[in-house]
Amino acid sequence: MTATPDQGALQRPLQMTINGEHKTLTVHPWTTLLDLLREQLDLAGTKKGCDHGQCGACTVLRDGKRINACLTLAVMCEGAELVTIEGLADGDRLHPMQQAFITQDAFQCGYCTPGQICSAVGLANEGRAHNRDDIRELMSGNLCRCGAYSNIVAAVEEALPLIKGARP
Amino acid sequence: MNSVVGTPMDRVDGAAKVTGQARYAADYPQEGLLHASVVSSTIARGRVVKVNSEKALQVPGVVAVLDHTNRPHVSSYDDDYSDDDAAEGSPFRPLFNDRVLYSSQPLALVIADTLELARYAGSLVTIEYSQQAHQSDLLAALQQTHEAPAETPEPRGDFAGHFAGADAKVDVTYLTANEHHNPMEPHASTVCYQADGSLVIHDKTQGTQNCQEYLHNIFGLPKDKLRVKAAFVGGAFGSGLRPQYQLPLAVMAALHLKRSVRLTLTRQQMFTFGYRPRTQQRLRLGVDKRGALVAIGHDAIGQTSRFEDFTEHLVEWSGMLYQCDNVALSYRLAPLDVYTPLDMRAPGAGSGVLALECAMDELASAAGLDPVELRKRNFASHNGNEGKPYSSKELLACYEQGAERFGWARRQATPGSMRDGNQRIGWGMAGGVWEAMQMKASAKASLDSTGHLTVSSATTDIGTGTYTVMTQIAADAAGIDVGKVTFKLGDSSLPTAPLQGGSFTVSSVGSAVRQACLTLRERLIERARQQRPDLASEADTAFTLENGQVKAGKHSVPLAELLAVDPQQCLEVQVEANPDDKRKPYSTATHSAVFVEVQVDDDLGTVRVTRVVSAVAAGRVVNPKTARSQILGGVVWGVGMALHEESQTDHALGRILNHNLAEYHVPVNADIGDIDVIFVEEDDRVVNALGSKGVGEIGVVGVAAAVANAIYHATGKRVREFPITLDKLI
Ligand code: FES
Ligand code: FES
């Protein structure tokens, strides 16, 4: 990028579905999915903990798969179906994973929580976790500085059987 | 009504946190918001000769570049930069002048229409320096120390004589590492510039009023034009105890441009302010034939900056946890060309008790005693530093219940004697202690005519569960269903509260909330009796408030009638709660006993903490669910301190090398095994009316020592330099 790019000319059209809503957007090619969500769409539930793919706070579901929104350019989401933490509940009815996080007190400050929950739902979609050790290993891309890990494992264990196969 | 204090209630802010509705400092949208980005120094000491910002300013969308030459006016008095958690000395003043005091110091601020532009333009700013030699290595500065301006207890008895004559003794030196708080939420401030020139600021802080006062002092803005809010804080662990530099920088930008501005620090920049300081600690312990401590010496050196003397309670614990008549404690500081350290979860105890409890384990080996037995024999019912009895200290019950749950009786004493295939198994333990303080705090309780109670105080909830436990305390004291209670916090305009830290929030703010709600209930009953003589003879306890009716016995009166005289039909009570004089003759503290199992791989030296039992005595537990979470988190921190965390400095550059979450290791889910938390019954009528001591710090203390002691038990190797990484074991 030169020192004086023509900002406007570089914008690209982008179509995708976010939390069930079809969106037609214009974005810069360098804008990450995370910055698009947080800064342009006021979907600030998705958090930025590092911006480097090192913490998992920005985890969202793209076509049912968990991804780091900070490592994904917005333009890479053309035609995608995106679900963020704001789109998991069914109206006032919490998603079973959200409810399990509350019941098990699987968070403290709550900053890593949207990423943890999206990651856990992605994990359920993968169908790979069969016991607590699997959960520990497969949830290790999501840091929790408050140290809620034991309760996160308990919450995921509680919710997994309730959501198997049910892709949000 | 059934008491809700003591029940494991779900967090009242749980739904907001699991649905993404909880907004943190950088999550507030603003019309026309500008974004700022910090340019940091690349030298550790010297002067700025010139900041070249022309190229950055040419980028369309860049609004301004601020540095020390063009920033808005700020105070030049040290006092004005002081705050409620300031260290002694001259606080850091961002963009104040051309002096560079440490590597990665903020030297310029780029403000632009978008975050990407601000960051990009920041990369175009170049800075010319005149550089001076620096020192960032504590171990190279051990000869240039001075006494810490801390209230280190005076020596008592004859340490040297009794240490020389002890039947068994140890003389060991430990090194602990610099550690950064790294809350998951980076520090951020969103400054909303109002039409009248006043500022509403969403800041990441543990004290909104501390920040308000600070900004008032340095910018000379009247306090009623400054409102600081922190409804949700994404962890802090001490990082928010002092206003951090993003706050004054964002305010400078907003004042300069008369626009709303947000500044969020990058993860890398989260390594450019306070941290738990590196220490060197020498422990000398001696026992007599019966295993009674006859001498305790604890000499510590901690690092600090050249501009402030940071002190923490590092060595005191060695004079108060155990019974001993001959104690000598010393604490010195080594100033370096680094930023000032900062209180970090269990400040002082985190590192100080680590050294003490490792040394106690070494002493147990030297004296041929079981580590639990040695501690039991030296139990202190008095705090030897203060010469006062403890208001309560169920530490013996912690040892017993923790050992029982862990299965400690099956431990084979000889190091290296337990294994499972090529995994060596080690069982270690340690004790923990933290002070149970109470600060002055205020709260307001307000009951509306529908029977809804709103209670408020300017405290914060950094994940500790303040919203929830205050709701519980208020509901019980007012005698109102917990579902009809709302607690408000995180706003400098609310009744005065101390910083949230030191595990004193429940004790301080909780006491104020309780008093406000008790008083409110009394007033309501008084009114009911005045207005309705048929209620006059009913006992206080007979009164209930349900469905908008105040009832006692067979009689009732509509709440709306009782509140008809109040402004807005709302009954309001505001109180200030002070620590009770009853506390004065006593020492107050929380205690713990931590038991840990590790597996150490014979060939690889990898360590896994497979099992932890933490038995805690903290008085009455307001919410066993959130309190347990505090202890679980503390254990994770202890594991990090023992095995992972170290901010590594390249001393040639004076700069932290591993300033990201891939290289600065915090424990991940797979690092954490089973954790069992026991709250030991502890009845304390002195500490405060709630009988509750707070649990934010005690969960950390002792854990790292128990891990280190377990590693010794597994391998026979004493590693005295933390963290214990595998290279030190193979
Ligand atoms: S913000 Fe994306 S992984 Fe940390
Ligand atoms: S809940 Fe605070 S970081 Fe996970």
Image (spheres, rainbow, N blue to C red):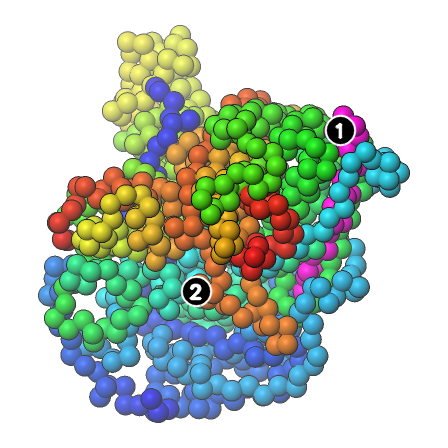
Q: Is residue B641 something that shows in the picture?
A: no
Res B662 label = 2
State which quarter of the image contains the C terminus of chain B: bottom right
* SS at circle 2: loop
Image coordinates of residue B712 in percent, x first then y, are 60, 45
> Is residue B281 rendered to the left or right of residue B727?
right
Question: In this rendering, is residue B379 above or below B417?
Answer: above
The one nearer the camera, B499 or B18, is B18
State which quarter of the image contains the N terminus of chain B: top left
Amino acid identity at mark 1: Ala
Residue A49 covered by magenta stretch: no
For label 1, the residue is B292
Write down the chain letter for disc 1.
B
> Is residue B236 rendered to the left or right of residue B128?
left
The residue shown at (35%, 92%) is A2
The residue shown at (38%, 42%) is A150
Task: For the residues labelled 2 and 1, say whether their Cβ atoms are less than 8 Å apart.
Answer: no
Image coordinates of residue B643 in percent, x first then y, are 53, 53
> Is residue B422 rendered to the left or right of residue A90?
right
Q: Residues within 10 Å of mark 1 (few under 14, many from 20)?
A: many
The one nearer the camera, B543 or B658, is B658
* SS at circle 1: loop
Residue B296 covered by magenta stretch: yes
The one nearer the camera, B285 or B649, is B285
Image coordinates of residue B606 in percent, x first then y, are 49, 54
The residue shown at (34%, 71%) is B33
- Tell me where the magenta segment starts and ends, as one range: B282-311
